[in-house]
Image (cartoon, rainbow, N blue to C red):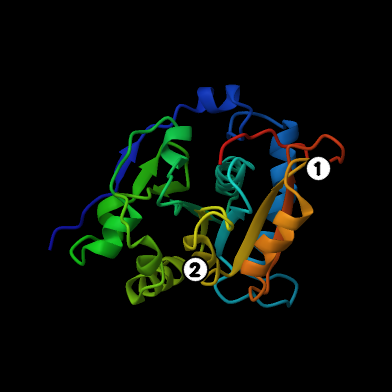
């Protein structure tokens, strides 16, 4: 049987740097330093350190928000870029916002088959649709073709099998999911329930306390929830500027 080599795509890193995002050659910017702080506890949970065991599927990390426009895609991409700089980890960035995918467009890439195609077609494998990038250690799984049964597909046995394969096939792999907003779709809570860690992005001075509380109710059974206060200049270590969903 022939082994299919992952397709390669070229991310315009100079463009991302101009957008204020984390890149390997971007130096020690404020945003790069902030995401170094954010990734540390996530990596500790995923790998286990100092006699503290790793949490179950701690390498599966979903980035979500209560509403659209809070910056979760921006945070997901920056987090993936930052973790890709680690010496001991590779990163798979998955666009799981299947109704409104934006990871590829933010990265300046064209739409491609991806997650939905794997779940819909038994003959489509992860190796068929994963995209290798020019960032060492970073691969991308696009959302793929939209489907009206997205919620059921994300809750299916095929999805659980895929998550197990993704989580356990490579010991050094960290998987970042860009999720739909929790209060806008049912897919988000279905996806979050299957993750080891959750990063919830909250837009500073815009997202209401009520929206945050309602969103947290959707993921209250998840034991490892982290909150990122986005687009704020009021607190050091929380100065993010992304406007992407």
Q: Residue at 54%, 56% (x, y): give it.
A: 89
Quadrant into which the N terminus falls: bottom left
Q: In which quarter of the image is residue 242?
A: top right
Q: For the residue carrying disc 1, how many other residues have a C-alpha within 10 Å: few (<14), some (14-19), or many (20+)?
A: some
Residue reaching furthest to the front: 210
Whether residue 41 appears in this view of the structure is no
Q: For the residue carrying disc 2, how many other residues have a C-alpha within 10 Å: few (<14), some (14-19), or many (20+)?
A: some
Where is residue 223 shown, x and y percent of the image?
67, 74
SS category of the residue bearing label 1: loop
**Would you name the residue on which mark 2 appears?**
190
Q: Residue at 71%, 70% (x, y): give it.
A: 49
**Would you name the residue on which mark 1 appears?**
237
Whether residue 186 appears in this view of the structure is yes
Where is residue 78 shown, x and y percent of the image?
60, 41
Whether residue 20 is situated above or below residue 83 in the rendered picture: above
Residue reaching furthest to the left: 1
Of residues 176 and 98, the one nearer the viewer is 98
Of residues 63 and 130, the one nearer the viewer is 63
Q: Residue at 74%, 39% (x, y): give it.
A: 33
With 34 as the anchor, is 113 left or right in this view? left
With 194 as the anchor, is 212 left or right in this view? right
SS category of the residue bearing label 2: helix
The answer to which of marks 2 and 1 sits earlier in the sequence is 2
Of residues 228 and 206, the one nearer the viewer is 206
Where is residue 206 shown, x and y percent of the image?
74, 41
Per the model, the C-alpha gap separating discs 2 and 1 is: 30 Å
């Amino acid at each position: 049987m022939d082994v299919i080599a992952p397709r390669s795509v070229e991310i315009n890193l100079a463009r991302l740097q101009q957008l204020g995002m984390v890149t390997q050659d971007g130096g020690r910017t404020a945003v790069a330093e902030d995401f170094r702080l954010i990734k540390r506890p996530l990596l500790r949970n995923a790998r286990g350190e100092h006699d503290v065991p790793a949490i179950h599927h701690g390498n599966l990390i979903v980035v979500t928000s209560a509403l659209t426009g809070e910056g979760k895609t921006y945070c997901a991409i920056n987090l993936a870029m930052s973790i890709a700089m680690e010496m001991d980890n590779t990163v798979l960035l998955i666009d799981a916002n299947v109704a409104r995918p934006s990871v590829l467009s933010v990265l300046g890439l064209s739409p491609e088959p991806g997650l939905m195609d794997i779940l819909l077609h038994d003959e489509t494998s992860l190796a068929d649709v994963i995209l290798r990038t020019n960032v060492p250690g970073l691969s991308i799984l696009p959302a793929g073709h939209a489907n009206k049964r997205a919620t059921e597909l994300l809750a299916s046995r095929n999805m659980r099998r895929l998550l197990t394969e993704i989580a356990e096939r490579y010991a050094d792999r960290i998987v970042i999911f860009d999720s739909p907003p929790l209060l806008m779709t049912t897919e988000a809570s279905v996806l979050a329930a299957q993750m080891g860690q959750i990063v919830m992005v909250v837009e500073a001075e815009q997202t209401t306390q009520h929206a945050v509380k309602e969103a947290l109710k959707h993921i209250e059974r998840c034991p490892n929830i982290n909150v990122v206060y986005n687009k704020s200049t009021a607190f050091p270590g929380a100065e993010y500027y992304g406007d992407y969903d």
